[in-house]
Amino acid sequence: MAQRPGLLPLGGGLVLAGALAVAVIGPARLVAQIEGERGIAPVASTGDIQVDGIQVNTTGKTAEEARRNGWREATRLAWAKAGGPQLADGQLEGLVSSVVIEREQIGPRRYIATLGVIFDRTRSGQFVAGASAVGTRSQPLLMLPLLYSGGVAQIYEVRTPWQAAWARFHAGASAIDYVRPTGGGGDSLLLTAGQVSRRSRTWWRNILDQFGASDVIVPVARIERQWPGGPVQGTFTARYGPDNRPLSSFTLTAKGPDQVPAMLDEAVRRMDRIYTDALLAGTLRVNPTLNSERLTLDPAVAALLAAANRVTAAQEQAIVADAVPGAAAPTIVAAPSVDAPAAFTVQFASPDVRAVDAALAAVRGITGVKSAATTSLAMGGTSVMRVSYSGGLDDLAAALRARGYTVTLGNGALSIRR
C-alpha cells in the first residue's frame, strides 16, 4: 500500500516519539517506579532490656566530659527504672550493651539529652526480674504502618515518619512477633495503602506466604497539622486481620514539628500494648480463613449432602429399571479411593487478581480436588498452582474442559486458558 508523502509509518512514529521523550525529559527521569529512596531497615529484635526516655542535664570541664557524665547518669537512672539493685558505676557500665541517643544538645561545658539505655539480658538478667521478658508469643504478624498525612495514604510507597518510628521500635521484648518489611524494592509496589482494603483471602495468603507471616496488623496514624510550625495532632488506630477490624484508638499531640518523632515513638509503644492486651484477651487470634488450604463443610451439612446424593442415585436407578422392563439394574460403581490424592502442577494465565481468584475457585470446585494453592504468582504473566486431586491427570483435564478451559497436557502438569 502506498504511503502518503510526509507521513512516517506507525512503528517509526512511535520510535521517534520515544526518542523525543528521552531528549526532552531526560533519561534520568525515565526510571521505573520501583527505584528511588525507599525502605528503612528495622533495628535488630533481641531480648535485651531497653529503657527509653531518660533525660539528663550534666556539666563538665569539657564537652566530652559533660557528655560522659550524662551517659553515666542516664545509666544509673535507667537501671533504677528497670528495677535493678544498687551497683557501682563500673559494674553498671559492664551491663550496658548500647546507648540510644533520642535527642541531645552539646555545649562547651554542658550536655542536655534524652537517651535510651539497653542492658544485655545475659549479664543483667541475674539482677533484674524478668517482668519484661516475653512469655506468651503471638504467631508472626505482617505489620503495615498506614499513614494519612496531607490527605494522602501511604505505607511503603515512600519513606514515612510512621514507618521510621516502627523501624526504631525495639520489638524483642514484645509479645507480638512483628514481621516488619524494609519497604524497599518490590515491597513498595506490593504493600500499598490500597492493599488494606482488599478482602480476597487468596490474595492475602499469597502475600503472607511471601513474608512468612500468619496474619496481618495495620497500625494507622492520621497526622493533622494545625498551622505551619504549630501543634501537630495524631489520631492512632490499631487494626488487625484481612477485614481491617479496629481494636482501639487514641490521640496524641506534639507542640511542634520537632516533637513529632517523639510523639510517634510514644504512639508505637502504646500500639504495642494494645496488640499485646488483645493477644492476652484472645481477641488477636489468627483468622482461620487465612491458614486453611481449603474450607471444609460443617459435618452436619456434609452428612445431609451425602444423604441427598444417595437418594438421588436410588431414584435414577429406579427410573432406569422402569424404562427397560426386565433389564438388570445398573451397577453403581463406587468412587475411587481418596485416601492418597496425587499432586499435579497447573499453569494458568494471571493478568490480574480477579483471574487468579477465578482460576483457583474453578479448580477447587472440581469434585475430587483436595487443595489448590499458588506456588508461583506472576501478575500479568503465567502463574503456577499445586493441585492435590483424587484421580488421574486425564480426569482432571476432562473436568477443567467441562468448565470451559482449553487444556494442554504435559508430563505430570497441565496448562489451562480460557
Image: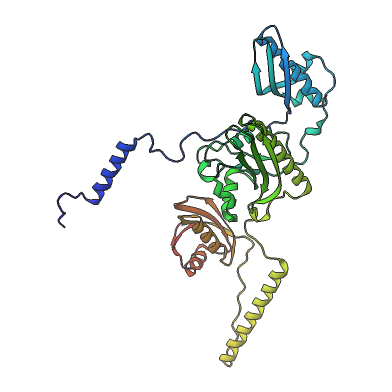
- Vertical arrangement, residue 63 with respect to residue 186, above or below: above
On-image quarter of the N terminus? bottom left
Residue 409 falls left or right of residue 264: left
Residue located at (77% from left, 17% from top) = 92
Residue 77 falls left or right of residue 236: right
Residue 97 falls left or right of residue 355: right
Residue located at (67% from left, 43% from top) = 236
- Residue 377 horizontal/vertical position (percent): 50, 50
- Residue 242 horizontal/vertical position (percent): 63, 52
Residue 388 falls left or right of residue 53: left
Residue located at (57% from left, 36% from top) = 160
Residue located at (85% from left, 19% from top) = 86
The residue lying toward the viewer, choosing from 271 and 201, is 271
The residue lying toward the viewer, choosing from 56 and 389, is 56
Name the image quarter holding residue 101.
top right
Most distant residue in the top direction: 61
Name the image quarter holding residue 33.
top left
Asked whether residue 119 appears in the rendered view, the answer is no
How many numbered tags mark residues here?
0
Name the image quarter holding residue 78.
top right
- Vertical arrangement, residue 322 with respect to residue 193, above or below: below
Asked whether residue 354 appears in the rendered view, the answer is yes
On-image quarter of the C terminus? bottom left
Q: Tell me, what colour scheme is on the image? A: rainbow
Most distant residue in the bottom direction: 325
The residue lying toward the viewer, choosing from 45 and 259, is 259
The residue lying toward the viewer, choosing from 295 and 78, is 78
- Residue 327 horizontal/vertical position (percent): 57, 89
- Residue 255 horizontal/vertical position (percent): 66, 32
